[in-house]
Image (cartoon, rainbow, N blue to C red):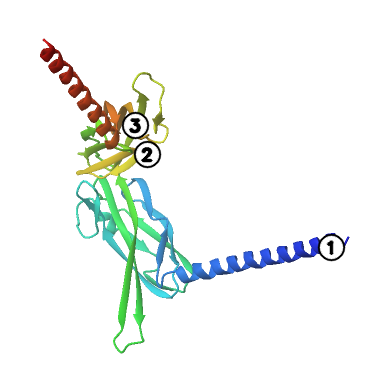
Amino acid sequence: MKRIKEFCQCLKIGVVALSVAIANMTVGGAVMAAEDAPEYRLAITPTQKDLNTIKPGQTYTGEFEIRNTGKHDFRYEISFSPYSVETETYEPDYEKETKYTDIAKWITVDAEEGFLKAGENVTLKYKVDVPENAHAGAQAATIMVTMTNDNEANDTAVQTVRQLGYLVYGNVDGETVKTAEILENKIPSFLFKPPVQATSLVENTGNIYTVAKYSVQVFPLFGDEEIYTNEENPDGNIIFPETRRYNTVSWDGAPQLGIFRVRQTIEIFDEKSVEEKIVFLCPIWFLFIVLLLIFFMIFWIISRIVKRRNEK
């Protein structure tokens, strides 16, 4: 009985010690999380809105949330910027004005400035008034949220600025043009290591934006049973008018060594492109061993031929 009591006492002490350790880990984790929070951080959710088809003369409304996830309070100001893209990798441009960025002039918000304490958030409502004479085609703009902080510790106020954008886009109804070209659909034939990547370049030659879809199928060298496919959930990219966009689809689960048939299908408007290739996946060390074996085989054959000639 004495040993049993001693065992129970030890067990209680162990449970208490474990509870204290867990509590310390939890509190320590919370302290670390608080310490890891940046001085100033601005967040927006969601980050974009697709208005789909916009009709001239109509008004569209929406909302998004501004959040202060940093340690300090800040002020914010709202402005409106055109949105377009540069290069085939779609670098955003918030200054260039085109016929596709007029919507920046149609947007208003219920409050163009405000103040947020640390940990607080506010919902901002906006309205898009589409004029009767709006021309048909794509439109895109950004509602810019600028965070400012006046540093009163110095005689001269220092302003810390951070910006995030809420993208608003859609297609104005009317005489729209839906045309595109698939300029490249490429699959590599030989790779030293995974992943297997299929690339492409598409151009939107119409006047509305659309979504290009990219699907990849992987088959064994002999057979039609799919090893990998994203057909049920293909990759999709927004393609704005009069732009080209480069895209890469990856098979990240590819093995280090193998031979496969890879097929990429690209669709945009009524255009469709299908490319299929045999892909060799071969690590460079394995290739070195194969070449070394071939060298020794050739050396052995030549040695045998020379030896037979000498024997004659």
Which amino acid type is marked by label 2? Answer: Asp
Which amino acid type is marked by label 1? Answer: Lys
Q: Residues within 10 Å of mark 1 (few under 14, many from 20)?
A: few
Task: Check disc 2 and report the residue beneath it.
Answer: 252
Viewer-proximal residue among 90 and 223: 223
Viewer-proximal residue among 65 and 259: 259
Viewer-proximal residue among 149 and 252: 252
* Helix, strand or loop status at disc 3: loop
Q: Find residue 284 and name its label.
A: none
User: For residue 309, what is the image quadrant?
Assistant: top left
Q: Find residue 5 and name its label.
A: 1
Could you tell me which residue is drawn at 34 percent across and 31 percent down? 257
* Helix, strand or loop status at disc 2: loop
Residue 65 x/y as whole percent: 44, 61
Quadrant of the drawing holding the C terminus: top left
Task: Check disc 3 and report the residue beneath it.
Answer: 257
Badge 1 or badge 3: first in the primary sequence: 1
Badge 1 or badge 2: first in the primary sequence: 1
Indicate left or right for 11 with 107 as reference.
right
Q: Give the mark toward the camera: 1 or 2.
A: 1
Viewer-proximal residue among 104 and 203: 203
- Tell me if residue 132 comes above or below residue 176 in the rendering: below
- Tell me if residue 239 comes above or below residue 114 in the rendering: above
Badge 3 or badge 2: first in the primary sequence: 2
Residue 43 visible in the displayed image: yes
